[in-house]
Image (cartoon, rainbow, N blue to C red):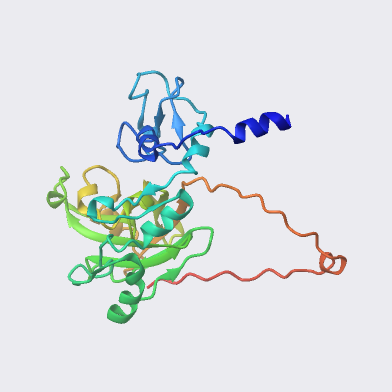
Amino acid sequence: MQSVLMEQANLELGLVDTTSLLTLLECPVCLDHITPPIKQCVKGHLVCTDCYPRLPHCPTCRSAMSEERNLGMEQVSRLLKFPCRYHPMGCKEAYTLAQKEEHERNCPYLQLKCPFHGQCSFGGALSAVVPHLKSDHSVTPVPVQPSGTLFYRAKHFFKRNLWNFIFKWDDNLFRFMVKHVHSSTVGRQENCNLLIAHIQYIGPDSMASQYAYTISLFDADRRKQGPKFQGIVSSTLKPLESQVSKDEVFVTTFYTARDHTDQFANLNFIINMKCLKVKEKVDIEEPTPRREETQRTIEPQPGPSTAAD
């Protein structure tokens, strides 16, 4: 066995062209790079995890899609460096998958608009959003408990036409927007006033698609829930109105919403956030606790409370 290992060590195996490997990891549907979890058809053709749920059959060979992941290519992908998503905008950086997501959150080539006020002239990287909100709008993102459940009260339902709530969950920033619109302005056939609501991710769309949410109206006086909607989070880079005609956001009529206001003319929402991304477990060996440590009782720590205006 030792001689075999020595012979292998003396072999000149050459180098692998990373660009060629990245071409193999290109989704045939969206043309984006495929990263774990890597999905495939029964014959082994790869697709990305975002496109997989929408595919009735393989886009390459028309065979059935497989439930099994391609674990071999997942291991290969972790050895490669991928170009930043904002390479077309000018970013020249490349990172391994373990570092790429963090870079793209704060890439200087990702320019975000102010998520709080539509007329604000702010334009900057994600890392500059929170300082901007605090200094220019006196707004601090509200921390949401780890379970992802929060309650929001849209105050003065009959006096306002827009509500904007910025919150932080799963170490990311989100915006909950509620808005009065007329059906004719959003491509809907109903000739009436509508109330639309949606959760948006403050950042790139690639991160937004990793989250889903459930919204329902809550009648505080009669203690019962109203209309309910389940959807996928989209990015603040995508206009809210463009998604209404595609049934990608919560939509109800003004009259239905009015019937669920409380005695103070407030409209109450129950929101449940959900992370769709499979978080990989990392096995870490923990040191064996000493005897006196095992006998110590650990008191639970209170989590952050939620508040909404």
Q: Residue at x 21, y 60 (%)?
A: 180
Q: Residue furthest right?
A: 291
In this rendering, the answer to whether 290 lies above or below 198 is below
In-image side of 287 versus 209 (left or right): right
Residue 73 lies, with reference to residue 232, above or below; the image says above
On the rendered image, what quadrant is the N terminus found in? Answer: top right
Q: Quadrant of the C terminus?
A: bottom left
Q: Residue at x 26, y 68 (%)?
A: 124
List x then y, in percent, for residue 193.
18, 55
Q: Is residue 209 visible?
A: no
- Left or right, residue 157 beside residue 185: right
The residue lying toward the viewer, choosing from 292 and 186, is 292
Instruction: Place residue 119 in its image quadrant.
Output: bottom left
Camera-side residue of 214 and 35: 35
Residue 241, given in percent of the width and then of the height, sits at: 20, 53
Please give left or right for residue 161 compared with residue 218 in the image: left
Q: In this orientation, which residue lies closer to the viewer: 107 or 188?
A: 107
Residue 169 visible in the displayed image: yes
Q: Percent x, y for residue 90?
A: 24, 56
Q: Quadrant of residue 106?
A: bottom left
Location of residue 163 in the rendering, given as x and y in whole percent from the top left corner: 28, 66
**Left or right: 174 in relation to 302:** left
Which residue is pictured at 30% across the width and 64% down the height? 108
Number of disc labels = 0
